[in-house]
């Protein structure tokens, strides 16, 4: 695990079919509450909800960006935006649905794909790593308690990276390093910045 702070967001689709970067299914700006899927991207922009094109225009593309697909069909739209910006190899799309990730791999060989796997829900870790590798998935992301040193090693042997989430305390960072995880999702930038 090497220090490398990157960005993370979530994606949904606006009423006019644009992928927008927002966590919740609604946007609240007092006194207004608006459902994301009922607003156009331009309307959502007035509430501070950007598109991926907006993010690239504001920040450039020299960073890794992980986006959780809150709506599965946002994946292709995000890949198209990253393709326009020549940033697809730095785009990581996250889903707990292997069928969605398999479809996205058929769309793009360059995009990074992350399977969000809840600890204890995917059966034998080896079979799961084998399935991810066969589908062209780049990474498995699981809570720390779902990883063992043997599981991390087997995932790596399959060519699948091992990520941990959501780690927000020093003990978790220490455990992740001991397990040999490749990266972590965290809200604690102060702890992440201290990783050497």
Image: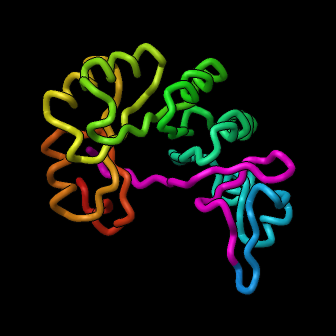
User: Which quadrant of the figure has residue 27?
Assistant: bottom right
Residue 160: x and y in percent read 35, 25
In the displayed structure, 142 sits above or below 48; it is above
Horizontally, is 126 left or right of 62 in the view? left
Quadrant of the image containing the N terminus: top left
> 146 and 80: which one is in front?
146
Horizontally, is 51 left or right of 100 in the view? right
User: Which quadrant of the figure has residue 153?
Assistant: top left
User: Which quadrant of the figure has residue 105?
Assistant: top right
Residue 134 located within the stretch drawn in magenta: no
> 92 and 17: which one is in front?
17
Residue 172: x and y in percent read 20, 56
Residue at 24% x, 23% y: name it. 124
> 26 and 185: which one is in front?
26
Residue at 26% x, 37% y: name it. 120
Residue at 42% x, 39% y: name it. 116
Residue 9 located within the stretch drawn in magenta: yes
Q: How many dots with numbers?
A: 0
Horizontally, is 20 left or right of 105 in the view? right
Q: What range of the chain is rendered magenta? A: 1-28
Residue 94: x and y in percent read 51, 40
Residue 11: x and y in percent read 63, 50
Residue projecting furthest to the bottom: 31
């Amino acid at each position: 695990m090497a220090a490398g702070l990157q960005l993370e967001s979530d994606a949904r689709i606006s009423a006019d079919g644009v992928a927008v970067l927002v966590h919740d299914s609604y946007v609240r700006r007092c006194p207004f509450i608006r459902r994301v899927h009922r607003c156009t991207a331009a309307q959502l922009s007035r509430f501070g909800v950007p598109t991926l094109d907006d993010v690239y225009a504001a920040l450039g593309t020299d960073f890794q960006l992980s986006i959780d697909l809150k709506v599965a069909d946002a994946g292709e739209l995000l890949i198209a935006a990253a393709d326009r910006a020549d940033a697809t190899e730095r785009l990581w799309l996250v889903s707990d649905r292997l069928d969605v990730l398999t479809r996205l791999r058929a769309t793009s060989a360059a995009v990074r794909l992350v399977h969000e796997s809840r600890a204890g829900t995917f059966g034998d870790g080896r079979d799961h790593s084998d399935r991810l590798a066969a589908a062209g998935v780049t990474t498995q992301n699981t809570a720390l308690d779902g990883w063992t040193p043997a599981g991390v090693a087997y995932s790596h042997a399959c060519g699948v990276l091992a990520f941990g989430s959501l780690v927000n305390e020093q003990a978790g960072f220490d455990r992740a390093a001991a397990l040999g995880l490749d990266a972590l999702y965290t809200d604690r930038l102060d702890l992440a910045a201290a990783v050497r």
